Amino acid sequence: MDRFDSSPERTSCDVDAALDHPIFRESVRRIRGWLGDTGLEGVERELLERLVHSSGDLSLAPDLRFSPGACAAGMAALAAGAPILTDTAMAAAAVAPMARRTFANPVRSVLEVAPAVAPPGGTRAAAGMALALAAYPGAVVLVGSAPTALERLLELTAAGTVPAPALVIGMPVGFVGVAESKRHLAASTLPQIRLEGSKGGAGLAAAAVNALLRRAWLDQAARERP
């Protein structure tokens, strides 16, 4: 298993260096200066910085939203080994390396369990979401491409058909059904991180969970030091 030794002789700098390439650290330093005061602190600020690093878009801050306690809930679930569900194989591929280097969370795309053909009037991602939520209770769920998958998640959890996820990262991208699905997510009581409007994508959704994995891993290493 590709995990890092968190023994006492390993310093916080050692653990940080094991997760972060020097180019990433320098990029974040510059991003922080460019962003200035965003009103975000701690892991929320780190998550925004990783989104900007992944997209090159310095205008994301006003559209980023967190429900109260969302990051803490997500990090606790990830540290406990919660599965990570994504709506695309691209997002799963972007998350898998960080998951392997930290808590070895299983990472699955809902398309792995989706029917080969979309049901009438639906999408494969929505159908796969229904099956994956039932198979992986307590998952951290990323939606970066398919608003239909996000809407299906909201329908099922509201009805009590499936257990509520530990966290929903709602960042579908586009112009058809996207803003509406995010408004519906905002109106729910689910722990959530979302980007308002049309912005999003697999890379941004993956960057968000990677930021949570990184911070949860570093926090655990700090707690384990004497």
Image (cartoon, helix red, strand yellow):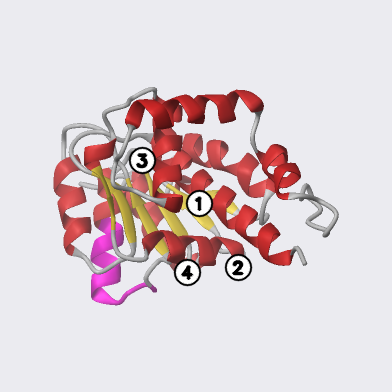
Residue 80: give its label. Answer: 2
Question: Please, what is the three-letter code of the amino acid marked with disc 3?
Answer: Gly
Q: Is residue 160 magenta?
A: yes
**What x and y, as percent, mark residue 150?**
29, 52
Q: Earlier in the sequence, mark 3 or mark 1?
A: 3
**In whole angstroms, how far apart are the C-alphas of marks 4 and 3?**
19 Å
Q: Secondary structure at mark 3?
A: loop
Question: Which marked residue is nearer to the observer: mark 2 or mark 1?
Answer: 1
Q: Is residue 31 magenta?
A: no
Q: CA distance from mark 4 to mark 1?
A: 16 Å
Point out the stretch of residues depicted in magenta.
Answer: 152-163
Image vertical order of residue 189 relative to residue 78, above or below: below
Residue 62: percent from left, percent from top: 22, 39
Q: List the residue tagged with mark 3.
A: 144
Q: Toward which corner of the image does residue 154 lie, by quadrant?
A: bottom left
Q: Is the C-beta separation of discs 2 and 3 under 8 Å?
A: no
Helix, strand or loop status at disc 2: loop
Indicate which disc, 4 or 3, sits on the residue closer to the N terminus: 4
Mark 2 or mark 3: which comes first in sequence?
A: 2
Residue beneath the point at 53% across and 44% down:
210
Q: Are marks 3 and 1 in contact (CB under 8 Å)?
A: no
Q: Which residue is mark 4?
A: 138
Whether residue 162 is visible? yes
Count neighbours of disc 4 (C-alpha within 10 A) and say few if under 14, some if 14 to 19, many if 20 or more: some
Helix, strand, or loop for circle 4? loop
Foreground mark, 4 or 2, reads 2
Q: Residue at x 56, y 37 (%)?
A: 93
